[in-house]
Image (cartoon, rainbow, N blue to C red):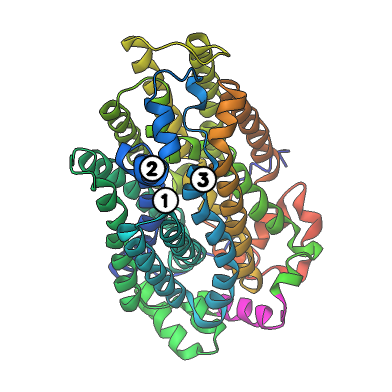
């Protein structure tokens, strides 16, 4: 066995009957719309916080520090304001708390109810943000958006992993990440358009348009069926079998259905999934569900996604140039996510993780060196046109690497590795860890940029080195393995195998 656990997944899981049906593709596309909520907010907040009218109304001290030429301040520190970062980061703190409530709702009432509640909360948050007249209403709106993101990110990846046939589970699950990238891209163009509104209310349009993805998700979830796994979990086996037949497009689903029932019976014996997930037999899932989202945030990607317009503006790009540069990186994000969709079930998860990690390390070191050479420690300097274009190219290469590796796989892998009895708890850990460190990065980035300067990019590059080594040694390949038979993958791994008891293996021996 290779030390990295780099074995073929084929043969470790059963081959179920049925194929790829239009029904399952349509339901997964509709469900993936939940990613638009997260993506639109990621893209919109950074653009809005670089708009003068928004800053003047809610953060006048930041506005004056960016405009007052008499104040000799480092380029790195122009936007360092804790209240301004709280506007961005408060959403993720709310999402962290909401993910625990969403875990209970998802387990007891099903995945679609959780999606519906998430869409509704996001809708109310968008309305409050659009009409906000003071900072209090603005932050309350952000908190409601966070509740929506927490519920959506808890339920949608699990829904997609349970609905999808094993051989295309990766591609359909990455539909969630694809929706996130589309949301970011749309937000970038919306910001560019609303920034041209001279009357000073363009930021309101940017924030209020978050209602569009919220309505799409809320209405879409009403018409979505629940997953066979969730229906069995709630005790309706005949209904679940009919749904499985519809999803797979065949009457012959007995083998897969029996595996789902077996998994559900094992799950029903677990009364306290939050207590059980800390047992040794679930050690691989606990570690992966914690470390993957932790590492995903310390790639530094949200530095780019939250604050791209602010970052580009800080580094001397003009107002329009900073928004256009953000839009260009947004296009790269979408295209690169398509690469992941078409390759994840062919080349596997590990290959994309490892290639993406190496590419990100190179790009971050180059970005840090370029900024350091031009601005130094004092933060005084500027880019030539050639250097500015080089910086943008390096950031786009970095975004591309993330978009076909840690971006989609950070949601896919934790959602597909947990057995049913701890699946909601595992996904809640995934979402809550993701949101906690998203909050920390969002709240701390502008201060970190001010204090660490160009060294911040070397800081994140160091983390990517660590996470790439972790993936090589500790993440086995999971492509094409039925979700209920995933324990066979862990049992065969050089390190994790000792934690998995024989009775935890579901399905027939290959």
Decide: few, some or many residues near mark 2? Use Cα within 10 Å; few <14, some 14-19, many ≥20.
many
Residue at the (19%, 38%) spot, across then down: 196
Specify whether residue 498 is in view. yes
The extreme front residue here reads: 70
Residue bearing the label numbered 3: 83
Dot 1 or dot 3: first in sequence order is 3
Q: In the image, is residue 507 above or below residue 346? A: below
- Over which residues does the magenta segment extend? 258-272
Residue bearing the label numbered 2: 337
Q: CA distance from mark 1 to mark 3?
A: 29 Å
Residue at the (27%, 42%) spot, across then down: 191
* Image x and y of residue 194, in percent: 22, 43
Q: Nearer the viewer, mark 1 or mark 3?
A: 3
Q: In the image, is residue 193 above or below residue 16? A: above
- Relative depth, front residue between 262 and 338: 338
**Secondary structure of the magenta portion, mostly?**
helix
Residue at the (56%, 53%) spot, across then down: 435
Residue bearing the label numbered 1: 177
Q: Nearer the viewer, mark 2 or mark 3?
A: 3
């Amino acid at each position: 066995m290779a030390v990295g656990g780099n074995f073929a997944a084929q043969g470790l899981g059963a081959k179920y009957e049925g194929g790829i049906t239009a029904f399952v593709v349509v339901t997964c596309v509709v469900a993936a719309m939940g990613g638009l909520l997260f993506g639109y907010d990621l893209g919109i907040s950074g653009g809005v916080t670089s708009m003068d009218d928004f800053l003047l109304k809610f953060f006048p001290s930041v506005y004056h520090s960016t405009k007052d030429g008499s104040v000799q301040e480092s380029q790195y520190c122009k936007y360092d304001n804790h209240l301004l970062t709280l506007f961005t980061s408060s959403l993720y703190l709310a999402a962290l708390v909401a993910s625990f409530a969403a875990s209970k709702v998802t387990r007891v009432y099903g995945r679609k109810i959780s999606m519906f509640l998430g869409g509704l909360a996001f809708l109310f948050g968008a309305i409050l943000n659009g009409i906000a007249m003071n900072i209090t209403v603005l932050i309350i709106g952000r908190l409601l958006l966070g509740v929506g993101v927490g519920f959506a990110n808890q339920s949608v990846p699990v829904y997609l992993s349970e609905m999808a046939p094993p051989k295309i589970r990766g591609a359909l699950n990455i539909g969630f990440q694809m929706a996130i990238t589309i949301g970011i891209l749309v937000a970038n163009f919306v910001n560019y358009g609303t920034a041209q509104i001279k009357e000073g209310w363009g930021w309101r349009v940017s924030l209020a348009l978050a209602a569009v993805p919220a309505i799409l998700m809320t209405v879409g979830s009403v018409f979505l069926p629940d997953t066979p796994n969730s229906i069995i979990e709630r005790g309706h086996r005949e209904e679940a079998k009919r749904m499985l037949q519809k999803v797979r497009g065949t009457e012959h689903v007995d083998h897969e259905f029996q595996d789902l029932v077996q998994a559900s019976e094992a799950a029903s014996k677990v009364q306290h999934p939050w207590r059980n997930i800390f047992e040794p037999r679930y050690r691989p899932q606990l570690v992966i569900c914690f470390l993957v989202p932790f590492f995903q945030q310390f790639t530094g990607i949200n530095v780019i996604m939250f604050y791209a317009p602010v970052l580009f503006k800080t580094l001397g790009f003009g107002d329009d140039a900073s928004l256009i540069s953000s839009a260009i990186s947004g296009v790269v994000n979408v295209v690169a996510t398509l690469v992941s969709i078409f390759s994840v079930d062919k080349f596997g998860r590990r290959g994309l993780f490892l290639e993406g990690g190496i590419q990100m390390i190179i790009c971050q070191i180059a970005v840090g060196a370029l900024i350091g050479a031009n601005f130094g420690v004092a933060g005084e300097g500027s880019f030539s046109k050639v250097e500015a274009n080089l910086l943008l190219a390096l950031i786009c290469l970095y975004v591309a690497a993330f978009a076909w590796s840690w971006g989609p796989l950070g949601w896919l892998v934790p959602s597909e590795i947990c057995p049913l009895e701890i699946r909601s708890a595992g996904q809640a850990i995934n979402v809550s860890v993701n949101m906690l460190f998203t909050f920390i990065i969002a709240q701390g980035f502008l201060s970190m940029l001010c204090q660490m300067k160009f060294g911040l990019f070397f800081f994140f590059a160091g983390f990517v080195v660590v996470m790439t080594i972790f993936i090589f040694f500790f993440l086995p390949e999971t492509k094409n393995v039925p979700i209920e038979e995933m324990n066979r993958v862990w049992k065969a791994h050089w390190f994790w195998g000792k934690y998995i008891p024989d009775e935890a293996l579901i399905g027939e021996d290959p």
